[in-house]
Amino acid sequence: MATQAHPRIVEESGAPVGQVDPPTFREAMAHWASGVTVVTVRLGDAIHGMTATSFSSVSIEPPLVLVCVLRSSRTHDIIARTGRFAINILGAEQRALAEQFAGRRPPDDQVDTQLAWQTGRYGAPLIQGATAHVECLVDTTYEAGTHTIVVGRVQAAVVDARKQPLLYWGRDFQRLEAAPIAGVRSKG
């Protein structure tokens, strides 16, 4: 399927017709719950990372994922240079790491954020305690607004099924709470 650019229609004032204003868009997106990841990269001895909630599987065959990376970030530059990265799907107990890698805590604030990591099978830095790790090679990239959509070909994946995920909803980090859904019977 070919990608096609659509023409922009503008009002006499120059504003695009039918384009939502940023505050309304942010509010709408705050109602989308997602998992929380930290994208990690290595350049020499230095490890860099960023919190990302715009992450998704793309394909099982071949195994592909995507993550949206802010183009002005160091992580973006290192992914572009090295062509590889890891996705660390954070556990419910890793909120402090998510905040630190999102820039909500200064790098020297070490309260509950001692980064324990290991080198993955293909050399990517993996954060210990995550619910899953996905090591990737860059397959394709697409520029979109302020971000680059990075499609990664998955080389390795490791899961710790004992852990609950960290979620992001309502502009804050949340825990998954098991609650019955009306009309749905539990297994048992």
Image (cartoon, grey):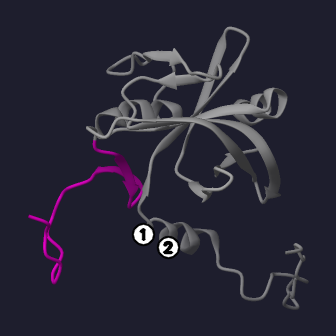
Q: Nearer the viewer, residue 158 or 28?
A: 158
Q: Residue at x 80, y 82 (%)?
A: 16
Residue 35 percent location from the top left of the image? 43, 51
Whether residue 16 can be seen here: yes
Above or below — where is 5 with respect to 157? below
Start-end of magenta stretch: 164-188
Residue type (three-letter) at the residue carrying disc 1: His
Few, some or many residues within 10 Å of mark 2 (<14, 14–19, 20+):
few
Few, some or many residues within 10 Å of mark 1 (<14, 14–19, 20+):
few
- The numbered dot on residue 21 is none
Prevailing secondary structure of the magenta residues = loop
Q: Quadrant of the C terminus?
A: bottom left
Q: Residue at x 38, y 59 (%)?
A: 169
Q: Residue at x 65, y 23 (%)?
A: 122
Whether residue 72 can be seen here: no
Q: Residue furthest front?
A: 61
Residue type (three-letter) at the residue carrying disc 2: Ala
Above or below — where is 115 with respect to 5? above
Q: Nearer the viewer, residue 120 or 77?
A: 120
Q: Quadrant of residue 59?
A: bottom right
**Residue 174 covered by magenta stretch:** yes
Above or below — where is 71 with respect to 74? below
Q: Residue furthest top?
A: 45
Dot 2 and dot 1 residues touching (CB under 8 Å): yes
Residue 53 percent location from the top left of the image? 52, 51
Label 2 – label 1 distance at C-alpha: 6 Å
The residue tagged 1 is: 31
Q: Quadrant of the N terminus?
A: bottom right
The residue tagged 2 is: 28
Residue 40 percent location from the top left of the image? 60, 29
